[in-house]
């Protein structure tokens, strides 16, 4: 598995994680965030997420060292958690996904905003996203997503593909043992979002690619509709369907 792809569009966003500069207060905020999320996660997260969490040995009481996580993750699926300076435009973001390097922020929310941050922080990125990258099918799906998106310039097509990302990577659900489990980072990392879904505040439909493509993303309200897969093969296959449709000239509109 090649992991030595040269990054060009994203190169200027790459930074080092200055691990020694984290304060004891920041480590303690991380520990508190993990302590608050774990009971719900143990009960309601997808098995694949829990497996990834264990495989990466994410720390409970200290902020994670991204290099140490990558040492455990890369031999398994080729993915790394790569520190970046913050928000990245699409082409740079997709280039990193295609190279199996997850753009990971290094800043952490403060104690006054434990539940919500307008932009992703290291808790959202590492606790929310990175454990899924240890799962082979999800890992291949996400790299393929990056490959497909990095070849597209048409904003309308990218907007449709953004819906696929939103309803899987960010807010994905899976049915396991008759129950709805969460694997999307926005649900994993947020008690409010996750509890809203688990309490039945949101319709959960069987994942169906056409329905996902028809459902716009709304970032400023709780979800009314989310989609549950039965297995990660479904989203892996969906990306191949999308790729061939795009190759045949479809703009993924109705
Ligand atoms: Fe995210």
Image (cartoon, rainbow, N blue to C red):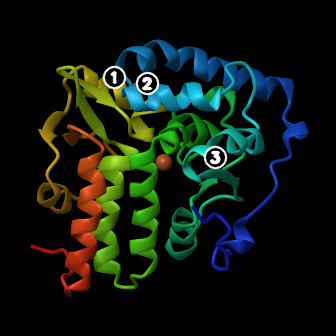
Query: Residue drawn 74% across and 64% down?
Result: 14
Q: Residue furthest right?
A: 20
Q: Can residue 217 be seen in this view?
A: no
The residue that mark 1 highlights is 195
Task: Name the mark on residue 75.
Answer: 3
Decide: few, some or many residues near mark 3? Use Cα within 10 Å; few <14, some 14-19, many ≥20: few
Q: Where is residue 83 in the image (x, y as percent from the top left)?
A: 71, 54
Position of 160 relative to 221 (above/below): below
Q: Is residue 59 left or right of residue 197?
A: right
In the image shown, does 122 or 139 lie closer to the viewer? 139
The residue that mark 2 highlights is 191
Q: In which quarter of the image is residue 163?
A: bottom left
Q: Is mark 2 on a helix, strand or loop?
A: helix
Measure how far apart labels 3 and 2 are at the Cα level.
31 Å
Decide: few, some or many residues near mark 1? Use Cα within 10 Å; few <14, some 14-19, many ≥20: some
Disc on the earlier residue, 3 or 1: 3
Quadrant the N terminus occupies: bottom right
Q: Residue furthest left?
A: 254
Q: CB atoms at circles 2 and 1 under 8 Å apart?
A: yes
Closest to the camera, between mark 3 and mark 1, is 3
Q: In this view, does 241 lie to the left or right of 67?
A: left
Q: Quadrant of residue 23?
A: top right
Q: Is mark 1 on a helix, strand or loop?
A: helix
Q: Position of residue 18 (x, y in %)?
A: 86, 46
Disc on the earlier residue, 3 or 2: 3
Closest to the camera, between mark 3 and mark 2, is 3
Measure how far apart labels 2 and 1 are at the Cα level.
6 Å
Query: Residue drawn 40% across and 85% down?
Result: 153
């Amino acid at each position: 598995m090649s992991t030595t792809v040269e990054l060009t569009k994203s190169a200027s966003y790459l930074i080092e994680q200055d691990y020694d500069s984290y304060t004891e207060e920041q480590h303690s905020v991380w520990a508190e965030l993990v302590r608050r999320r774990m009971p719900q996660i143990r009960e309601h997260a997808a098995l694949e997420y829990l497996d990834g969490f264990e495989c990466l040995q994410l720390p409970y009481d200290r902020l994670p060292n991204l290099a140490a996580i990558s040492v455990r993750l890369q031999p398994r699926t080729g993915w790394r958690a790569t520190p970046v300076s913050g928000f990245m435009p699409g082409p740079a973001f997709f280039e990193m996904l295609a190279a199996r390097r997850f753009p990971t922020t290094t800043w952490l929310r403060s104690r006054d905003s434990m539940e919500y941050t307008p932009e992703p922080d290291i808790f959202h990125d590492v606790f929310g996203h990175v454990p899924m990258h240890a799962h082979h099918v999800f890992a291949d799906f996400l790299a393929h997503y990056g490959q497909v998106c990095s070849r597209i310039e048409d904003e309308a097509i990218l907007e449709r593909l953004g819906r696929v990302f939103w309803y899987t990577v960010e807010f994905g659900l899976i049915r396991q043992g008759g129950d709805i489990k969460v694997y999307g980072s926005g649900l994993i990392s947020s008690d409010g979002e996750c509890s809203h879904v688990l309490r039945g505040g949101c319709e959960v439909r069987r994942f169906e690619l056409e329905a996902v493509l028809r459902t716009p993303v709304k970032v400023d309200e709780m979800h009314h509709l989310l989609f549950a897969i039965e297995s990660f093969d479904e989203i892996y296959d969906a990306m191949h369907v999308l790729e061939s449709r795009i190759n045949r000239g479809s703009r993924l509109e109705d």
